[in-house]
Amino acid sequence: MRKQQNHQERVQHILRHAAQVFRERGYEGASIRQISRSSGVALSSLYYYCRSKQELLYRIEILAFTQILDRLEARLAAARDPGERLRVLVRNHLEYFLEHPDQMKVMAHEEESLAGAYRKEVAEIKRRYYRKALEVFEGLGGKGGVRRVSPRVAVLSLFGMMNWVYTWHRAQIDPAAGELAEMISNLFLEGVRPEAIPPAAGGNGRRLRRLAPVRAGAARANS
């Protein structure tokens, strides 16, 4: 049992350093030798734990999505209110990636670097995550409704808000994950709830409600 634990700890150590090297140099610019030097694991030993640079990238992504999904499932089990479930989704995502910025950058920029079975398996677990987020969003329809907007557009826009936080977040001046998650959840929820847009003078409230999703999408595209 202890031997197996030591093996897993060594693999985790290697993956952390591989993510750091990939972040600094990019997947194409990184080498196994650089990862060996960064991790302090001899090159021959490193190949014992991971057979190739592709496998390292694959393991980084699979491990990240597995941990995110497992923790999300556990947290959602204790949340019944649809709005709270959305907040759990956002908080879970932000907490993980603010704790693992190297992995976040690798996953954001190296999506196309995987090939073959590795790429297929990562794509499948990403679809599982997307489907879970879609399920959470669609649950909002039962409590006060949401504005008529494509669930796919809404969920992917939410991921767009969350996934790039690492590019601007500074721990010294920006909110921690919990407070930041509350802010982003409020921004998102107020954007999809019908009551978020008050009637305009002159009876144009209905027209504004129809245009709001389009304008919101345009704003996100131009940001």
Image (spheres, rainbow, N blue to C red):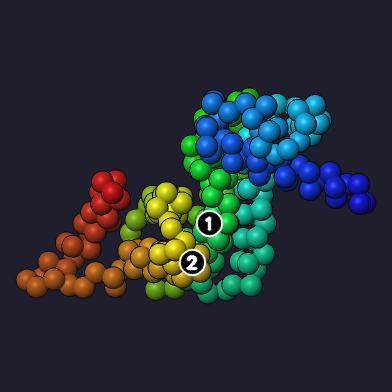
Give the mark, 1 or 2, whose residue is nearer the N terminus.
1
Distance of label 1 from label 2 (alpha carbons)? 9 Å
Image coords of residue 173 (percent x, y): 40, 64
Residue at the left extreme?
202
Q: Secondary structure at mark 2?
A: loop
Three-letter amino acid code at the position of disc 1: Leu
List the residue tagged with mark 1: 98
Q: Nearer the viewer, residue 70 or 168?
A: 168
- The quarter of the displayed image where residue 147 is located: bottom left
Three-letter amino acid code at the position of disc 2: Ala
Label 1 close to label 2 by CB (< 8 Å): yes
Kindly identify the residue that appears in the image at 38 percent across and 63 percent down. Answer: 188
Q: Which mark is residue 176?
A: 2
Q: In the rendered image of this protein, does residue 157 appear above or below residue 145?
A: above
- The quarter of the displayed image where residue 170 is located: bottom left
Q: Secondary structure at mark 1?
A: helix
Kindly identify the residue that appears in the image at 52 percent across and 32 percent down. Answer: 26
Q: In the rendered image of this protein, does residue 32 appear above or below residue 184?
A: above
Kindly identify the residue that appears in the image at 32 percent across and 64 percent down. Answer: 191
Image coords of residue 96 (percent x, y): 58, 57
Q: Nearer the viewer, residue 104 or 29?
A: 29
Q: Nearer the viewer, residue 81 or 100?
A: 100
Image coords of residue 206 (percent x, y): 18, 66
Instruction: Give neighbour class at mark 1: few <14, some 14-19, many 20+ (Cα, 10 Å).
Output: some
